[in-house]
Image: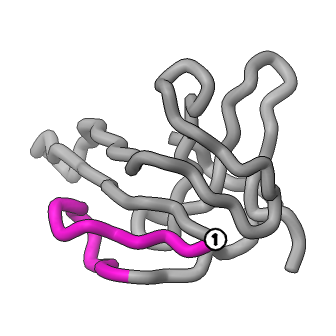
């Protein structure tokens, strides 16, 4: 399995593909107080990440949430996520041209 995280040259942030949201989530782990085991192919972070944003769905603004713990390369989604994935989902590789969020 290859790297599932992408580093950004202008920061210490890391990004990964979210199969629930179908987009990249940026992990500001050093700025937010998370711990990271340094493993780029099967990463573990603590505590959980909770991404929230608004997007337009037609004429309506929709609030989105993606909340998970990332342990040994497995995304463990919480029930407050607005996508349909729940529980343990292995991290997929980053697509060639991912959309970031």
How crowded is the residue under tag 1: few (<14 C-alpha within 10 Å), some, or many (20+)? Answer: some
What span is in magenta?
73-87
Residue in front for this viewpoint, 5 or 47: 47
Picture quadrant of residue 78:
bottom left
* Residue linked to disc 1: 72
Lateral position of residue 44 relative to residue 101, left or right: right
Would you place residue 79 above or below residue 56 in this image? below
Q: Name the residue: 30% across, 79% down.
A: 86
Q: Secondary structure at mark 1?
A: loop
Placement of 96 over or under 99, stated as above or below: below
Q: What colouring does the structure picture have?
A: one colour
What is the quadrant of the N terminus in the image?
bottom right
Q: Is residue 16 above or below residue 14?
A: below
Res 98 → quadrant:
bottom right
Which of the two residues, 36 or 15, is positioned nearer the viewer here? Answer: 36
Residue 67 picture location, percent across and down: 32, 55
Tell me the residue at 81%/57% (across/down). 40
Q: Position of residue 97 (x, y in %)?
A: 76, 55
Residue in the foreground of this view, choosing between 58 and 69: 69
Vertical side of 83 occupied by 8: above or below: above
Is residue 76 magenta-colored?
yes
The answer to if 9 sits in the magenta stretch is: no
- Foreground residue, 34 or 23? 34
Horizontal and vertical percent for residue 30?
Answer: 61, 25
* The furthest residue to the left: 60
The residue under the point 16% across, 46% down is 62
In the image, taking residue 77 as reference, residue 69 lies left or right, namely right
Q: Residue at x 56, y 74 (%)?
A: 74
């Amino acid at each position: 399995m290859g790297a599932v995280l992408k580093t950004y040259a202008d920061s210490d942030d890391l990004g990964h593909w979210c199969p629930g949201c179908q987009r990249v989530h940026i992990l500001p782990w050093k700025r937010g107080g998370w711990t990271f085991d340094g493993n780029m192919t099967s990463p573990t972070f603590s505590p959980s990440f909770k991404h929230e944003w608004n997007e337009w769905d037609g004429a309506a603004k929709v609030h989105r949430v993606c909340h998970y713990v990332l342990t040994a390369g497995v995304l463990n989604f919480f029930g407050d996520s607005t996508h349909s994935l729940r529980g343990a989902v292995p991290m997929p590789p980053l697509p060639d041209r991912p959309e970031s969020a």
